[in-house]
Amino acid sequence: MTRKTEPGHDGVTRRDFLECVGVATGCALITPLLQACEVAEIVIKEGGEFPFDIKDLAGLEKVGGMVPMKAGDHKLLLIRVDDSTVVALSQTCPHMNLSLSPDNGGKWDGKKLVCPWHKSEFGADGKYLGGVTVAPKDVPDLPSYEVVFDAKAGTGVIKVGGGPA
């Protein structure tokens, strides 16, 4: 479909102009929101290891911090459980496959990871602890991955194999 323009017009109609303004405004509004979502992208293959430094992952500098990460096909949450321990858990709740990321409201309360959607609770080892919406037998444990962490150096390695630890 071609649009007719008035004689002496350069070809840009009012409709074209308003569509462009709408798209530009939408982009301007959503860009800061996308920049606020911090997900570290890890490019490794199955069976790989990912070294990390907490200086590069601001959320892990303090106990209780969580950082969402992607390692190959694995969406992970790194959680600083205490001064000397970082754990890696699946970022996807096994109850309904929804995100446990802090960007979506997932929380580490110091003892357990709480799903923002249905309040399922998981320990630092990924074990299902309970929740308000389902019986324990209905929710499998959260996949966990091996992490070797040197608290003194502030560095560690996530070991992502063919499956969870």
Image: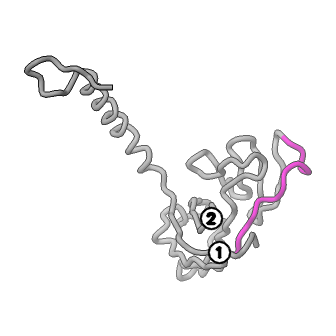
Residue position marked by numbered label 2 in the rendering:
73
Proximity of marks 2 and 1: CB atoms separated by less than 8 Å? yes
Q: Where is residue 89 in the image (x, y as percent from the top left)?
A: 69, 63
SS class, disc 2: loop
Pick the residue in front: 7 or 57.
Answer: 7
Q: Where is residue 156 in the image (x, y as percent from the top left)?
A: 58, 78
Of all residues, the one furthest to the left in this rendering is: 8
Quarter of the image with the N terminus in it: top left
Residue 147, which numbered label? none
Residue position marked by numbered label 1 in the rendering:
46
Left or right: residue 77 versus residue 122 is left
Magenta-colored stretch includes residue 136: yes
Instruction: Please tell me which residue is depicted at 75% across the width and 46% down the height of the picture.
Output: 96
Using a 10 Å C-alpha cutoff, classify the residue at mark 1 as few (fewer than 14 neighbours), some (14 to 19) or many (20 or more). Answer: some
Pick the residue in front: 21 or 77.
Answer: 21
Pick the residue in front: 68 or 112.
Answer: 68
Quadrant in the rendering for residue 18? top left
Looking at the rendering, the stretch of residues picked out in magenta corresponds to 134-147
Ranked by sequence position, the earlier of labels 2 and 1 is 1
